[in-house]
Amino acid sequence: MADQHGKTSHTKRLTPTRVLALSCALLLLAGILPLYAIAFYNHPYYDDYGFSAQVRGVWLQTQNAGQVLSAAVQSARHVRATWQGTYTGTFLSNLQPGVFAEGLYWLTTFFLLTAYLVCFGFLLWTLLRHVLQASPALAVSIASLILFVSVQFLPAVNEAFYWFNGGVGNIFIYSLLALAIALLLRLSWAKRGYGLSLALLGLTVLLGGGSYGGGLLGILLFTGASALAFRYQNRFRFVYAALTLCFLLCFLYNVSAPGNALRAQAIGQGLSPVEAVARSLYYGVALFGDYFTLPVAALALGLSPFLYQLAKQSRFSFPRPALVFLLGFLLFCTQLTPPLYAGVFLGGERAYNTYYVSFLILLLTAETYALGAYARKRERSACAKTSVAPAAARHIAMLAVCLFAIGCLGYKPVDEVLYGPMHTAGGSALLSLVRGEAKTYHEQMLAREALLNDASLPVVTLAPLTAVPPVFMEDLLRVDAVYDVAPILARYYGKEAVLLEGGDSQ
């Protein structure tokens, strides 16, 4: 009887939902482990050198953390006066891990990727577990699948998780925004909101000094949360209003930086406000079409039975789904307006990463809302059967798997020739590790850094790299490079000149 009872208990623990949760979590883990593993071969990129040269000099002279932080603040003030006002990313860029030792640069990925997974995972857990009342196993399943697709098909994983300067000012800011949204939701039902309010206050200060697209999006989200809090007479409605005001003031401080005007002059003529808004709507439609790939379609289709059940069983009425979709689309386009207005088009691949992630979250939110509206409509029409039949759910799952497989087989970044799953973020990282590409890059970068750190050499000549993993930033110290990065390296390492083998100066 004991054995039989033990088998029964074990069977209860391994329910289909828990097996699904374990499978999805393992899939996510398998996709991100190569991304962490290859990080140990990574090295600083050129904007990392440019932003942190002053701080590195202070660290080498003093080895004092307080003076390093002071130098980072001074450097951020200088950038605010001469280039841009995004004080959060600028300050953190001065503290990139390579400042203290090039061998610590692997911390870049561990910091940026972990922050992304934790913050967006926390947001998804809050939405699924606490708002839609999903079971823990189902919440883990859905969140793992969303995080897997969002990471593996990111437009530029190198600029998100392997370049500190680019990642900390963009994908990291959106990670903080995801965390802030989750805390805003939790504040609405909290009994005592002191800790949440303080945490949100700190986040608004950081977000106000982040990217301009993310800042504008965040202010609108905070404003919407405040409006809802007052409409439903939430006990923390004045806290919501104060947080929104703080966010707005910090963002205005960011936007009013003298360096923004100087940068605009250097870049050239931007668009008028009306033109920027109009083009953001146009490019918003274009990006929707670009991001709605087969893997994303498979994700939305595969999750639909689960999202339908969660929405159906929730307490929400889901009125006006068309209006919600329109508002979601306008929120998405909001991010595009600041870079278009500033004359930098859509802001580069590091910004495209943030657009892709926000698209995915908004798409699945709109899908859940639409499914909830459909469920309520069926209830009003007195349909006896409003749940998804098991057979239908299995067919949907099989179709989603097929779509996802076809999408992976047909996946190809713009600069690649072949199609296939080896171009996903984790697949590309794993392939670089297996082929020895990451090791070769690491060894050649170590050879460069040995020369650059040799104080007895005022002038160094560096060899071009022969291998760069696709998940890393491309090498710009080459003959055909668009930008001359040698002066940046010379300043960072205190050299009279940095030359390139085969270059014009040879």
Image: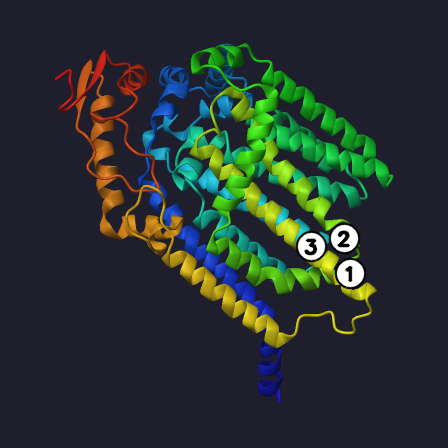
- The residue labelled by disc 2 is 318
Crowding around mark 3 (Cα neighbors within 10 Å: few <14, some 14 to 19, many 20+) is: many
Viewer-side residue, 466 vs 460: 466
- The residue labelled by disc 3 is 370
Task: Mark 3 and mark 2 in contact? Answer it, CB < 8 Å.
Answer: yes
Q: Amino acid at mark 2?
A: Phe
Image position, residue 97 (x, y; %): 40, 30
Image position, residue 271 (x, y; %): 53, 20
Label 2: element kind = loop
Label 1: element kind = helix
Image position, residue 462 (x, y; %): 18, 25
Q: Amino acid at mark 1?
A: Arg
- Distance, label 1 to label 2, CA atoms, is 8 Å
Specify whether 240 is left or right of 395: right
Residue pictured at 37% horizontal, 34% vertical: 105
- Distance, label 3 to label 2, CA atoms, is 8 Å
The numbered disc on residue 376 is 1
Crowding around mark 2 (Cα neighbors within 10 Å: few <14, some 14 to 19, many 20+) is: many
Residue pictured at 31% horizontal, 40% vertical: 41
Q: Earlier in the sequence, mark 1 or mark 2?
A: 2
